[in-house]
Each structure stands twice: as C-alpha cells, then as structure tokens.
Image (cartoon, rainbow, N blue to C red):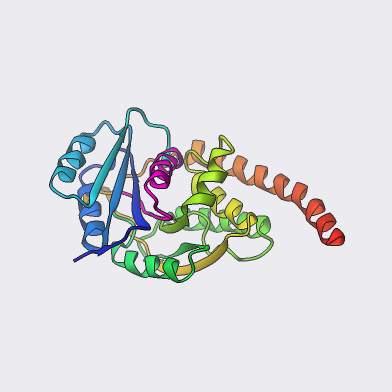
C-alpha cells in the first residue's frame, strides 16, 4: 500500500513524454498518495491516457494545461492548487522514468523530519550517462557554488526534490523567470537565499535510450543559453545582495 499524506504530495510536470509516463505514474502511486500530474500542453495523447488512469484511481489527479509553457510553469500551476488544498510540500519528479520512485518515501520522511528544508536529490550516474550532460551539470554546479558561496546545493539540475510550498510559490510568483529549464537551479538558489535549509540525498538516475522509451526535450543551444543567462543574472543579484547583508550585519 502507498503511504498516504495530507501534507506532502508527488508533483509530476509532463510534456509529450510518450508511454513511459504511465510507468512513471504507476510507480509513484505504488509508493505515495496523492500523485498529481500537470500535463503541460502535451499533444502526444498522454493527457487523455492519464485522465483515464485518474478515473480509476482516486489517489491520482491530472491537471491539463491547454498549451505548453515550460516545466517551471507546470510546477507553479501545481503549487497554486496545492496551496488551496492545504498541502505544505511537493516532491517534484520527471515524467520520463529517469527518477527513482522507490526513494519517494525516503525523501518524504526526510522532509517530514525537517519541514523547513528543501530536500535535494544528488544524482548518482551510471556508465551510460552521456558525458556531455555530466560535464554540463558540473559547470552549472560551479556557478551554483559561487551563487551560494559554498557547496550547499549538491546538484543544481537534478529535478527529484521536495520543496516547501509556501516559500517556493512566493518566490516564483514574484518574477517571470523559473518557468522553463531554468526552474531547478534558480529555485534552489533563491530558496537558499531566503534562508530555506538544504538537505542533500544521493539518488540514482537513469538516462534511457530511445529504444527504451527515453525522450528529451532539452535543446542544447536554446536551453544552455537560457541557463547561462540565468546564472549571469543570479551572480549579479548576489553582488547586489552582499553589500546589503554586510550593512545589515553592522547594524545588528
């Protein structure tokens, strides 16, 4: 039986994931309830398939957005609804089968023990992981270490995480960024700046080949430029924050 919770839910943003999403959702439901899927304007028939799944499982809620707006926008849609229903935390995971559903209870338990924190997955790669992806996230992590002035965030890009709903919703609602692939790193950095504690936990990650149903919507040029622009923006924001903090420290 899955663990049922009135405070913590699993939130899965989904855009044209193909049939793999049904396995992902089934595995999540095996370990936790409720599970919410935000269908971000998918055109591959999975909106209809997931809606049919929800008709037969009261623990599954499917939110269908009419057009694709990006991963972060899909998460924000789920956060807004979670707030109105009294949920305090969401565990975000990808719909493509890369993330370890079996670790959902472990991450949720860590969040319950430290509810003021965000619980961040740190990916443990297999030999099959594309080298370009591994090296790319090392560069992103380097920037994140600068932005947080230390190695507080174990991995800036891994999307298997538990977030406290209220501070994340407040931060996202105050800006137009964090709507696409910039969501994961910027969310972690800005929550850290707001004083949200960090708990890092290792988690295995699978990179599925096309023959295994793997689908990636990451566009190397477009989305890497998006991430570079985000890190530049965060570094300048940090430079603005440092004098203010030093001034506040002298006045304290």
Picture quadrant where residue 14 is located:
top left
Q: Is residue 57 magenta?
A: no
Residue found at the very far left of the displayed protein: 56
Q: In the displayed structure, does residue 46 sit left or right of residue 78?
A: left
Residue 35, given in percent of the width and then of the height, sits at 28, 52
Residue found at the very far right of the displayed protein: 250
- Residue in front for this viewpoint, 207 or 91: 91
Decide if residue 135 is in sight here.
Answer: yes
Decide if residue 96 is in sight here.
Answer: no
Q: Tell me what residue is drawn at x 43 percent, y 46 percent.
A: 83
Q: Tell me what residue is drawn at x 32 percent, y 62 percent.
A: 100
Q: Residue 29, relative to residue 210: is it above or below?
A: below
Residue 11, given in percent of the width and then of the height, sits at 35, 50
Picture quadrant where residue 250 is located:
bottom right
Q: In the displayed structure, does residue 179 sit left or right of residue 87?
A: right
Q: Tell me what residue is drawn at x 83 percent, y 62 percent.
A: 252
- Residue in front for this viewpoint, 203 or 7: 7
Residue 77, given in percent of the width and then of the height, sits at 41, 39
- Label count reads 0
Q: Residue 44, relative to residue 209: is it above or below?
A: above
Residue 162, given in percent of the width and then of the height, sits at 43, 59
Give the residues in magenta: 72-96
Q: Is residue 86 magenta?
A: yes
Q: Which quarter of the rendering shows the N terminus?
A: bottom left
Q: In the displayed structure, does residue 175 sit left or right of residue 60?
A: right
Residue found at the very far top of the displayed protein: 66
């Amino acid at each position: 039986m899955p663990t049922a919770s009135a405070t913590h839910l699993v939130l899965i943003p989904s855009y044209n994931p193909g049939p793999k999403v049904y396995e992902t959702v089934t595995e999540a439901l095996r370990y936790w309830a409720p599970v919410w899927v935000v269908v971000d304007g998918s055109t591959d028939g999975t909106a209809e398939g997931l809606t049919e799944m929800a008709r037969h499982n009261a623990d599954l809620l499917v939110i269908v957005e009419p057009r694709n707006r990006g991963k972060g926008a899909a998460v924000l849609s789920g956060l807004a609804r979670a707030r109105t229903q009294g949920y305090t935390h969401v565990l975000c995971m990808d719909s493509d089968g890369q993330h370890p559903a079996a670790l959902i209870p472990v991450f949720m338990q860590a969040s319950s023990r430290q509810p003021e924190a965000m619980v961040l997955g740190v990916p443990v790669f297999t030999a099959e992981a594309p080298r370009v992806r591994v090296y790319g996230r090392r560069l992103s992590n380097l920037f994140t270490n600068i932005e947080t002035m230390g190695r507080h965030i174990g991995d800036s890009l891994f999307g298997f995480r538990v977030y406290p709903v209220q501070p994340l919703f407040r931060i996202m609602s105050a800006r137009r960024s964090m709507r696409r692939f910039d969501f994961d790193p910027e969310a972690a950095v800005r929550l850290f700046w707001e004083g949200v504690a960090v708990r890092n936990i290792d988690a295995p990650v699978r990179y599925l080949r096309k023959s295994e149903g793997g689908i990636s919507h990451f566009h190397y040029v477009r989305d890497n430029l998006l991430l570079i622009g985000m890190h530049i923006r965060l570094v300048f924001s940090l430079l603005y924050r440092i004098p203010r903090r030093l001034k506040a420290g002298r006045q304290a």
